[in-house]
Image (tube, rainbow, N blue to C red):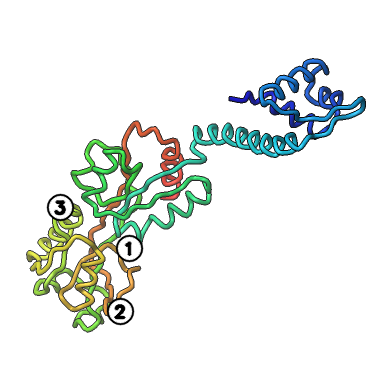
Amino acid sequence: MLDIKPLRYFVVLAETRHFGKAAQALHLSQPPLSRQIAALEASLGVRLFERNSRHVELTAAGRQFYADAKALLASTGAAARNAVAAEHGSIGKLTLGFTMCAAYGVVPRFVTAFSGAFPEVTLALREVVSEDLAPKVRAGEMDAAILIPGAAELGLERRTVTSEPLCVALHRGHALARARRIAARRLASEAFVVAIPDVAPALRNAIVDHCLAAGFFPSIRFEVQLQQTILSLVNEGAGIALVPLSMTKAAFDQVVFRPLLDAPHIEQVLVWRAGNPNPCLRHFLDLTQRAA
């Protein structure tokens, strides 16, 4: 393996074409420089310079070696800088998981701010159903995740990043679609489309508890995994749904959203594993704390 120091000596000599000037630039005396160049040529088995009393010229082998040596020195310097940057988390990769609600809510704001502050960090974004997020963070498959809280994230660090009210999603032709705001008691005879309990227990419980407070248990027609599927069914007139406010950004031609009177609020939390060694995570946690 070539020593990097002789390469630097070679490059300076190639650019000055003079042993005395090269030695001065390198803060050496001329004899040690001459010995280094001679040793380099011996190790390569080629002549790199044609010498005369006043200056030196590169041979054909020297011209090729100069191009390669410059590239190698540049990559070595970049490698050293990148190692320092990686240690400080200004380059690298961060894997973030999130639910569909977060995709329509805080995720775009967080990732835009983080990418602006750390443009050399690759953000790997993974939209996953809520119950799968915490296990993936715990297993190290994701650095952090944004989800609706439940029991699955026990043992992880967590921080609330947003809280939003539920609203009513209705088919455009529904009798309540013209209402400015809807009280839960007016939904007592409606067929509900809801997430299955295991997907987002906090969301499911908030919906059931709000209906119970209004004097009825919701008539559940469909249980599904994704909020997008819930709205697809509402779009077809299959039922109504109570969804987080961020889902109003989803585009469905036949779905309208109306405020829910005295609506419960649903938290979304950022979770991560204590002791995660990824230095990029620290920057993401700091930035999201300010952004939230």
Q: CA distance from mark 2 to mark 3?
A: 29 Å
Between disc 2 and disc 3, whose residue precedes?
3
Q: Secondary structure at mark 3?
A: loop
Q: Secondary structure at mark 2?
A: loop
Query: Which residue corresponds to mark 1?
Result: 246
Q: Seen in the image, is 284 located left or right of residue 142?
A: right
* Residue at image location 27% in from the left, 38% down from the top: 139
Q: Position of residue 133 (x, y in %)?
A: 26, 48
Q: CA distance from mark 1 to mark 2?
A: 17 Å
Mark sitting on residue 253: 2
Query: Which residue corresponds to mark 3?
Result: 198
Q: Where on the picture, by quarter, is residue 273?
A: top left
**Amino acid at pointer 2:** Asp
* Residue at image location 85% in from the left, 30% down from the top: 56
* Residue at image location 42% in from the left, 57% down from the top: 108
**Camera-side residue: 4 or 44?**
44
**Camera-side residue: 27 or 54?**
54
Mark sitting on residue 169: none
**Amino acid at pointer 1:** Ser
10 Å neighbourhood of mark 1: few (<14), some, or many (≥20)? Answer: some
Between disc 1 and disc 2, whose residue precedes?
1
Q: Nearer the viewer, mark 1 or mark 2?
A: 2
Question: Are discs 1 and 2 less than 8 Å apart at CB?
Answer: no
Q: Seen in the image, is 213 located left or right of residue 245?
A: left
Q: Seen in the image, is 83 located left or right of residue 170?
A: right
10 Å neighbourhood of mark 2: few (<14), some, or many (≥20)? Answer: few
**Camera-side residue: 77 or 2?**
2
* Residue at image location 26% in from the left, 66% down from the top: 228
